[in-house]
Image: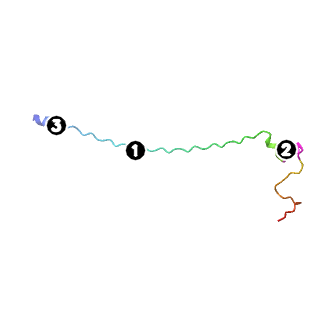
């Protein structure tokens, strides 16, 4: 009887292994790019416009890249 009791004591309970949980990967958020504001460069806004020219009295013939009706194109 003694041996039986001794053997029973020796038996240990087996520990259950815990399953590891898989970690979910977080999605990275894309950063929005900020639009740059264009700086207005002081006087230049009216310098080369027709309004600006009129104010300064630079109304001598405006040279335009497009041919006028008076010009004759030789091809």
Q: What residue occupies the far bottom of the structure in this picture?
A: 75
Label 1 or label 2, whichever comes before in sequence order = 1
Label 2 or label 3, whichever comes before in sequence order = 3
- Which quadrant, please, contains the C terminus? bottom right
Q: Which mark is residue 22?
A: 1
Q: Quadrant of residue 43?
A: top right
State if disc 2 and disc 1 touch (CB < 8 Å).
no
State if disc 3 and disc 2 touch (CB < 8 Å).
no
Q: Which mark is residue 70?
A: none
Label 1 or label 3, whichever comes before in sequence order = 3
Cα distance between the residues tagged 1 and 2: 70 Å
**Left or right of residue 66, residue 27 in this image:** left
Cα distance between the residues tagged 1 and 3: 39 Å
Instruction: Tell me: residue 75, above or below residue 52.
Output: below
**Left or right of residue 25, residue 7 in this image:** left
Prevalent SS, magenta region: helix
Magenta region:
50-58
Mark 3 — residue?
Answer: 8
Is 9 contained in the magenta span? no
Is 54 contained in the magenta span? yes
Callout 3 environment at 10 Å: few (<14), some (14 to 19), or many (20+)? few
Q: Secondary structure at mark 3?
A: helix
Mark 2 — residue?
Answer: 52
Q: Secondary structure at mark 1?
A: loop
Q: Position of residue 74 (x, y in %)?
A: 84, 64
Callout 1 environment at 10 Å: few (<14), some (14 to 19), or many (20+)? few
State if disc 3 and disc 1 touch (CB < 8 Å).
no
Name the one closer to the observer, 47 or 21. Answer: 47
Q: Position of residue 10 (x, y in %)?
A: 17, 36
Q: Quadrant of residue 3?
A: top left
């Amino acid at each position: 009887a003694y041996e039986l009791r001794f053997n029973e004591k020796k038996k240990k309970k087996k520990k259950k292994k815990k399953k590891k949980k898989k970690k979910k990967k977080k999605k990275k958020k894309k950063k929005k790019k900020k639009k740059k504001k264009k700086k207005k460069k002081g006087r230049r806004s009216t310098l080369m416009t027709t309004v600006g020219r009129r104010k300064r009295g630079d109304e001598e013939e405006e040279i335009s890249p497009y041919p006028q009706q008076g010009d004759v194109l030789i091809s």
